Image (spheres, grey):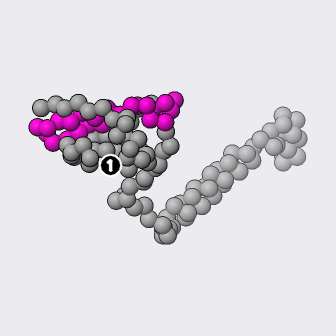
Amino acid sequence: MWHISKRWLQGLGLEFCLPLPLVAIVFWFGCSFLAAQELSQSYSTEKKLQSDTQLEARLSVNVLLINATVNRTRRITQVEVETADPILKRLELELPTIEFSQIEATVAQELGLPRQDVRKLVRYEIVE
């Protein structure tokens, strides 16, 4: 009986295909077991993310114009910097001061420019 069914399976090409579902089930259970083992392990991290620090980036841009709008009632200054850089065309800053010397010093520090250059480029607008 086994010889007849074996020849019949070989003739149909099913001798190879019949064990495939069994192999697939064993493979699936094996992978599930290994994944469960890996995911159940705890890993300690050596480095921790610090969220209270700020990343400081310095850009070297060609500044064309600096517009500073001084709002005396709110006691803030809004600064718009126009550059010749194709990527960074405009930069906006809000400063908590209305003193011209402090505005120029802060903008010079932020842009990495000499204070004299900032003084030449800045245009003030005073808003009440």
Q: Quadrant of the C terminus?
A: top left
Residue shown at 66%/54% (left/top)?
A: 26
Where is mark 1, residue-wise? 105
Nearest the viewer among 52 and 96 is 96
Q: Would you say residue 128 is visible in this rendering?
A: yes
Nearest the viewer among 116 and 36 is 116
Residue shown at 24%/43% (left/top)?
A: 100
The amino acid beneath tag 1 is Ala
Q: Would you say residue 8 is visible in this rendering?
A: no
Nearest the viewer among 87 and 54 is 87
| Residue 16, position as x, y percentages in the image | 81, 43
Other residues around mark 1 within 10 Å, as few (<14) / some (14–19) / many (≥20)? some
| Residue 101, position as x, y percentages in the image | 26, 47
For residue 10, side relative to residue 79 (left or right): right
Q: Does 75 lie within the magenta span?
A: yes
Q: Which residues are magenta?
A: 62-88
In this view, 102 is above or below 68 = below
**Quadrant housing residue 18:** top right
